[in-house]
Image (tube, rainbow, N blue to C red):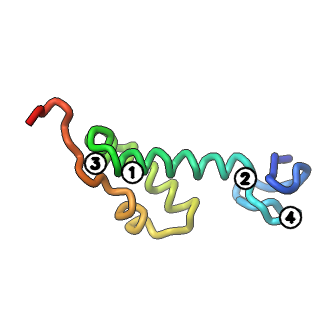
Amino acid sequence: MSTNCVKCVTAERTRTDLLCEKCGSEADTLIAAKKAIQHVLSQIRDHSTIGWYMGWGTTSFDLLTKAASALWDEPLENVERMFAPLNPKDPRDQT
């Protein structure tokens, strides 16, 4: 399978191999996925409403933290701690 590797457009790789076999760099799609996951997890952590709807106890938070853990080779507990919602608030509560 050909990929659009950052450094080696013609590199061949398998679905389970995250690095280009020819030059060792990550594929463009993997880099984009990492950035997207980090962005959404940061929004969950930093914005109270997003943290309320997508934080602890949601399938979204569970799937995103597991994906980040796998992609970054970081223990799940560390990822959950790094991106735990700081101050989740129900937007319906106007107190």
Tell me the quarter of the picture where residue 21 sits.
bottom right
Please state the horizontal and vertical placement of residue 82, each as a whole percent of the image. 39, 62
Q: Amino acid at mark 4?
A: Cys
- Disc 3 residue type? Gly
How many residues crowd around disc 1 within 10 Å: few (fewer than 14), some, or many (20 or more)? Answer: some
Which of disc 4 and disc 1 is earlier in sequence? 4
Location of residue 93 in the rendering, given as x and y in whole percent from the top left corner: 12, 33
Amino acid type, callout 1: Asp
Residue 23 is labelled as: 4
Residue designated by label 3: 57
Q: Which residue is mark 2?
A: 15
Q: From the viewer's perspective, is 79 left or right of 37?
A: left
Q: CA distance from mark 1 to mark 3?
A: 7 Å
In this rendering, which labeled residue sits more in front, label 3 or label 2?
3
Q: Secondary structure at mark 3?
A: loop
Q: Earlier in the sequence, mark 1 or mark 3?
A: 3
Where is 75 relative to 31, above or below? below
On residue 62, the disc is 1
User: Residue 92 versus residue 3: which sits nearer the camera?
Assistant: 92
Numbered disc 4: secondary structure: loop
Locate residue 20, reporting x and y percent. Answer: 81, 60
Going by the numbered disc 2, the residue's amino acid type is Arg
Q: Are marks 4 and 2 in contact (CB under 8 Å)?
A: no
Element under label 2?
loop
Q: Foreground mark, 1 or 4?
A: 4
Dividing the image into 4 quarters, which one contains the C terminus? top left
